[in-house]
Amino acid sequence: MLKLTRRALMAAVAVTPLMSYAAAAEGLISIIVTDPANPYWFTEGEVAKATAESMGYTANVSAHKGDTNAESTLIDTAITNKSAAIILDPANADGSIGAVKKAVDAGIPVILVNAEINQEGLAKAQLVSNNAQGAALGAEQWVTDVGDAGKYVELFGNPSDNNAATRSNGYETVITQYPDLEKVGKEVANWDRTQGYQKMQSLLQANPDIIGVISGNDEMALGAIAALKEAGKLDQVKVGGFDGSPDAVAAVKAGEMQYTVLQPVAVFSAEAVRQADNVIKTGSTGAATEKQLFDCLLITKDNVDKYTAAFTLSE
């Protein structure tokens, strides 16, 4: 997996201008992500940490790895450490509600990033990619690349994450407009590259004549590409991803992946910290709504050279 450098992460922070502070802020901002082994979540945590530190806070990053029990324990730790605010990528749309409530009851504001919970009014803000818009963007490009007739399969993310269903539904809305495109398989691969590889192997065995794979994220897509390479079928099957990870961008450059949909994680991770700072100082995020959507961008071979830092596409 491509290693993200501190320089690249700071470049990602630099594209989202910070306010000027006359005096250093005080306090700890606890940042809880899903799994930093995935470059997307690694960037999420590191950009938030770098932003907080640039504003005068201390910050730490921990990971729940999709486990709500681990998430609850990390929230307890953040409370014990008297965090000024918590930046959380929730483990589960329903299962994380209790953890958020626990922090709020302790008087600690929570800003959610990347994924939502199914209850409003607890978190001060929920900052997420516009997954429906991004899915439509990706699916339209996928049809352009694959064509309007043939068999295809889908790799689906973690069912406990609302983003998985939102992206899948977005794909369906676009692709079902082409009746000669037939989905012959769909497997859950939980956002994971190894699972994407394994599920792609099974899908290929059952459907050797597919012409396309549409994936809920880049890690699953990269696993699928590895399986297709191994089977000698990558030149016959086109793959689309979602995230805009450095490894996916490298695959687009190499002609192995047709496109990836960039989630602006570097932008909203930095913005989450700024809104947390506003809450700490004024009691309000300064935003008009709790739920805030950040539009995704398409990366293809035509604009891939504008990818200048981790999850960052220059104008």
Image (cartoon, rainbow, N blue to C red):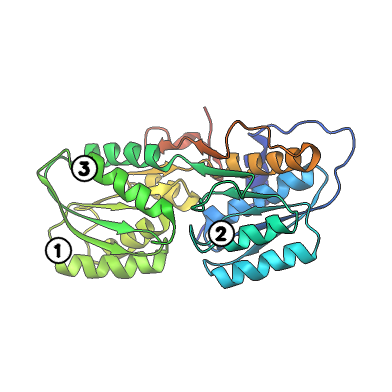
Q: Which mark is residue 175?
A: 3
Q: Nearer the viewer, residue 27 or 56?
A: 27
Between disc 1 and disc 3, whose residue precedes? 3
The kind of secondary structure element at disc 3 is helix
Q: Nearer the viewer, residue 160 or 104?
A: 104
Nearest to the eye among marks 2 and 3: give it: 2
- Residue 227: percent from left, percent from top: 29, 65
Residue in view at x 85 percent, y 43 percent: 25
**Mark 2 and mark 3 residues within 8 Å of each other at the beta carbon:** no
Q: Nearer the viewer, residue 50 or 188?
A: 188
Q: How many marks?
A: 3
Q: Residue furthest right?
A: 23
Query: Would you name the residue on which mark 1 appears?
Result: 207
- Give above or below for 43 relative to 279: below
In the rendered structure, which amino acid carries the disc numbered 2? Ile
Q: Which mark is residue 97?
A: 2
Label 2 CA crowd tier, 10 Å (few <14, some 14–19, many 20+): many
Residue in view at x 59 percent, y 46 percent: 121
Q: Judge left or right: residue 260 versus residue 56.
A: left
- Residue 78: percent from left, percent from top: 73, 62
To which quarter of the image does residue 164 belong?
Answer: bottom left
Label 3 CA crowd tier, 10 Å (few <14, some 14–19, many 20+): many
Between disc 1 and disc 2, whose residue precedes? 2
In the rendered structure, which amino acid carries the disc numbered 1? Asn
In the rendered structure, which amino acid carries the disc numbered 3? Ile
Q: Nearer the viewer, residue 221 or 272?
A: 272
The kind of secondary structure element at disc 1 is loop
- Residue 7: percent from left, percent from top: 67, 46
Residue in view at x 46 percent, y 45 percent: 244
Q: Is residue 240 visible?
A: no
Q: State the CA–CA distance, disc 1 to disc 2.
A: 40 Å
